[in-house]
Image (cartoon, rainbow, N blue to C red):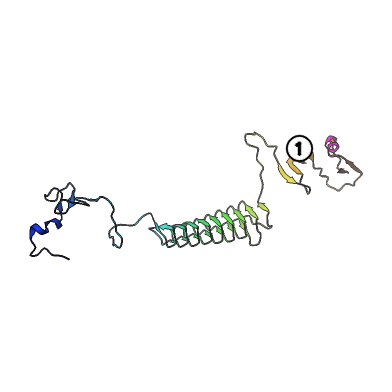
Amino acid sequence: MATLTNQQIDLTYPGLIKLNNNTVLGAVEQSITDGVGNASTLNLGTTSASFIGTLDLTGATINGITPAGLEVGTGTNSLMNAVGGASISSGVNSVAIGNSTTASAESSISLGDRSTASGYGSFSAGLFAQATQFGGFALGQYAEASQSYASAFGPSAGAHAESGIAFGQQTSVPFGLNGAIAMGRQVTAVQADTTHVRELYIVAPDGAPLGGNGITMLSPNGTAQVVTAADSGTLEIDSRPVVVNDAATPTSVINVWSGTEAQYGALGAYDANTIYYTI
């Protein structure tokens, strides 16, 4: 570092640092210049300082500033929280925000408290929520999606089969029941590609004061049939009553009737001792 000792003032003053107004430092910031008036990026006063232009702190150690917000994770283009529990965003394009969350797979997102997203493109949010396979989605406290494309919604919901959906508190789709759906509270699926509910309530159509709508099912040849409840308390299929013998003791079959569906619907009244066939 050069010294000014034994140097002529008229030859060295251009390298001196001074205030722009050539006075003492005051409360009003002044630009810091060299001896010939070239301004620097620093403005300095007795109570404040400011910079103009770019401030490069590469390699610098900064003390006294508490970090906040987000910071770059270890994965390419990844983000994680800068304060709180040590979150990990090690997957490419991953995001980990919260207390000790982990997003370790590419394009994974983990939010909340100790949640984990370790499957490619997976998402987890909630206390100890886990999405561990490709495209898994876990939302809720202890929710777990442990197979590809599985989705778990609600506290302790578990989707453990491929493309399975567990929706509700403590619902479960066990391993191997691919495509099954469990909905409600404490509902467990028992068959693949089937929707399971604890109880089904058919509500009135939008804007309708009463009911009248039903459940549509397909016959083996693909014909849509609508099952509804009649005001009398009986079931109907496409407005045709489903005849049930309510007698306390069995009755014998006396008659056999056959005809078209139109003829069957026109009968109006039906005998419990008659078997009806439509052709």
Kind of residue at badge 1: Ser
Where, by quadrant of the figure, is residue 147 drawn?
Answer: bottom right
Q: Quadrant of residue 149?
A: bottom right
According to the picture, the residue beneath numbered tag 1 turns out to be 232
Question: x, y percentage for residue 240?
Answer: 79, 39
Q: Which residues are magenta?
A: 261-266
* Number of residue marks: 1
Above or below, 32 against 274 in this view is: below
Q: Quick check: 3 left or right of 118?
A: left
List x then y, in percent, for residue 206: 62, 36
Q: Residue furthest front?
A: 11
Residue 218 vs residue 17: left or right? right
Position of the N terminus by quadrant: bottom left
Residue at 84% of width from left, 39% of height from top? 261
Q: Position of residue 210 (x, y in %)?
A: 67, 35
Q: Is 258 drawn above or below residue 124 in the view shown?
A: above
Q: Nearer the viewer, residue 179 or 39?
A: 39
Taken as a whole, is the magenta stretch helix, strand or loop? helix
Look at the image and say whether residue 265 sits in the magenta stretch: yes
Does 73 lie within the magenta span? Answer: no
Residue 80's place in the image compared with 230, above or below, is below
> Who is closer to the viewer here, 255 or 35?
35
Position of residue 105 in the picture relative to residue 225 (left or right): left
Element class at badge 1: loop
**Frontmost residue, 109 versus 6:** 6
Q: Position of residue 216 (x, y in %)?
A: 72, 44
Task: Find the residue positioned furthest to the bottom.
Answer: 1
Quadrant in which the C terminus is drawn: top right
Callout 1: 10 Å neighbours few (<14), some, many (20+)? few
Left or right: 97 in relation to 145: left
